[in-house]
Image: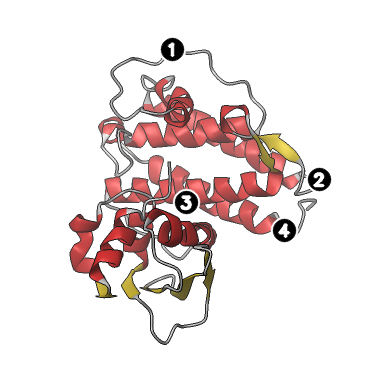
Amino acid sequence: MTIHPSLQPYADAWTHSVEAIAELMQPLAEGNWNRATPCPGWSVRDIVSHVIGMDCEMLGDPRPIHSLPRDLFHVRTDFARYMEMQVDVRRHHTAPEMLAELEYTIIRRSRQLRNETRDPETSVRAPLGAEQTLELAMRMRAFDVWVHEQDLRTALGVPGNLDSPGAHVTRDVLLQALPKVVAKDAGAPAGTAVVFDVHGPVEFLRTVRVDANGRGTVDGAPSLGPAVTLAMDWETYVRLACGRVRPHTVADRIKAEGDQELADAILASFAVTP
């Protein structure tokens, strides 16, 4: 094994999730590939296409030359247009074609990971022609594939893996976004503390504190007098943070205490994925 120790958790999480996706897809009848998922505008086939396409980009494959239809209601930004290219180019592929490409991509990507010798700080290609470190790229692939595994499980009615390695990577990625959600997007005033109490397969208690300059930080120390405490289960937290549900549709699964106006503003800004 040549992969850098700091990259190994992301490689393991990606492997666990992508193999779970392959297992979910293997017995699926052709018609079920068209089922809608919680990911806006994407079917089961579309999500698998996205997973394949993004891992092909990690492999360095050229992006497809393809013109998108003009009537895709969910494609509203350059980022969404970039992501849609790998999806739309596969929209007419059959289930056997999709399975074969998924399997081949997993084989190629697994081999790449086993032979990875680059430093985690190596610059690699990011969406829209930007660059990012190899470590960030691998973290975001582990996050993305786990979230989409959950989209597929929801669409197919096969729950599971809410506490898998990818779930813990996802927790850390989403926690990094909390200070901006509270301090900037929701406009919590200086001196505010907001507690997030999450229970279920992945449990954590975190406090976001807004300093005198309006900047937010997150830590694991409880606050004695928080302005808001938001308690919810892990699955609800993920679905909210990834924009799969609106706060009002899961209100019965959220307990908000304290400043209700601020709590509503935080929940309204909770989705952090593009």
Q: Between residue 134 and residue 212, name the one nearer to us.
A: 212
Q: Between residue 147 and residue 111, name the one nearer to us.
A: 147
User: Which residue bears the numbered disc 1?
Assistant: 67
User: Which residue bears the numbered disc 4?
Assistant: 6
> Looking at the picture, how far across and down is residue 92, in whole percent?
36, 19
Q: Between residue 273 and residue 51, name the one nearer to us.
A: 273
Distance between the Cα atoms at labels 3 and 2? 24 Å
Residue at the limit of the structure toward the front, as seen here:
212
Label 2 vs label 1, nearer the camera: 1
Work out whether 227 lies above or below 99: below
Q: Say whether residue 202 is left or right of residue 126.
A: left
Query: In terms of secondary structure, where does tag 1 sit?
Result: loop
What kind of residue is marked 1? Ser
- At 46% from the left and 61% from the top, the residue drawn is 178
Res. 95 image quadrant: top left
User: Which residue bears the numbered disc 3?
Assistant: 146
Reading the chain from its start, which is encountered first: label 4 or label 1? 4
Query: In terms of secondary structure, where does tag 4 sit?
Result: loop
- At 47% from the left and 51% from the top, the residue drawn is 146
Residue 101 circle label? none
Label 4 vs label 2, nearer the camera: 4
Q: Quadrant of the C terminus?
A: top left
Label 3 vs label 1, nearer the camera: 1
Reading the chain from its start, which is encountered first: label 3 or label 1? 1
Query: In terms of secondary structure, where does tag 3 sit?
Result: helix
User: Which residue bears the numbered disc 2?
Assistant: 117
